[in-house]
Amino acid sequence: MKLHSSLGPNPRIVRMFLAEKGLVEGRDFERVHYDIIAGQNRQDESYLAKNPLGTIPTLELDDGTCLAESWPICEYIEEVRPSPDLFGADAKERAEVRKWVRLFDQEVVVPMTMGFRATTGRAMFEPRMAVLSEEAGAEVFAMADAKWRWFDGALGGRENFALGRFTFADLIVFCFAQFGFSVGWKLPEGTGNLARFLETHGHRESAGVWKEAE
Ligand SMILES: N[C@@H](CCC(=O)N[C@@H](CS)C(=O)NCC(=O)O)C(=O)O
């Protein structure tokens, strides 16, 4: 299979997930890089045929099927490679993991992404999609920060959001914090639990995907 990849949090979510599953680049999958700053993902017709959204990542299977959207791509990988499980071992566990993922996706990822596109990332995104005004961007960034604080409280002294072990919920939180750091964001005041969480999971081998430049 081929992972169509780039800078940014979403392809790294999939890369980190693949690494957690023990799937190795060059052996188990090939990585194809796109220059998203130059907009290659939205101009290259052959890429748009694989993913008409033009977003990265896309996972292209050996039979030519192309899967888009980082979370469903990871769910696919989980189904074909169930061990170690990162979404939970049974229906109840999966519901718990997906609850945290859904909450984080809606309450942090969406406003953080929209805030980034309208402010720091404006020059890159304004020509390619509708973006909020800079003022609204700053407001949604602040909304995301309020939710980061909420997640800090919900985490408390634990190392994991769900199931007492590393799951996709931890992985997505970890990746969006790393993305934030890469664009000049800082953890909001009073989020010492998250700082500890990031330090702990930063030692995972899979976190190495954040150490190399794309
Ligand atoms: N909801 C999508 C978001 C994908 C996304 O926005 N990817 C970014 C890279 S992290 C991208 O393609 N940016 C360049 C662009 O939108 O042109 C997912 O989960 O995969």
Image (cartoon, rainbow, N blue to C red):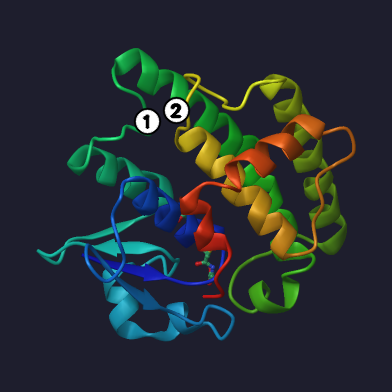
Q: Residues within 10 Å of mark 1 (few under 14, many from 20)?
A: many
Foreground pick, 95 / 134: 95
Asked which secondary structure carries label 1, the reply is loop
Could you say whether the residue bearing mark 2 is in a helix, strand or loop? helix
Within 10 Å of disc 2 (Cα), the crowding (few <14, some 14-19, many 20+) is some
Instruction: Return the x and y of residue 179 as percentages of the image width and height.
Output: 65, 58
Q: Position of residue 135 (x, y in %)?
A: 88, 57
Residue at 28% across, 17% down: 90
**Alpha-carbon span between mark 2 and mark 1:** 7 Å
Q: Amino acid at mark 2?
A: Arg
Residue, x 50% and y 61% (percent of image)? 209
| Residue 101 image point, x, y percent | 51, 33
Give the quarter of the image for residue 95: top left
Disc 1 residue lies near ligand 1 with CB under 8 A: no
Residue, disc 1: 87
- Circle 1: residue type: Phe
Callout count:
2
Q: Residue at x 66, y 77 (%)?
A: 124
Q: Quadrant of residue 199?
A: top right
Q: Of all residues shown, which one is farthest toward the top? A: 92
> Does 4 sit above or below residue 111?
below
Mark 2 near mark 1, Cβ–Cβ under 8 Å? yes
Judging depth in this view, the residue of 206 and 127 nearest the camera is: 206
Q: Give the residue at mark 2.
A: 98
The CB of the residue at mark 2 lies under 8 Å from ligand 1: no
Query: Is 62 on the left or on the right of 197, as rendered?
Result: left
Judged left or right of residue 8, residue 25 is left
- Marked residue nearer the N-terminal end (2 or 1): 1
Residue at x-position 26% and y-position 44%? 76
From the viewer's side, name the closer residue of 83 and 141: 83
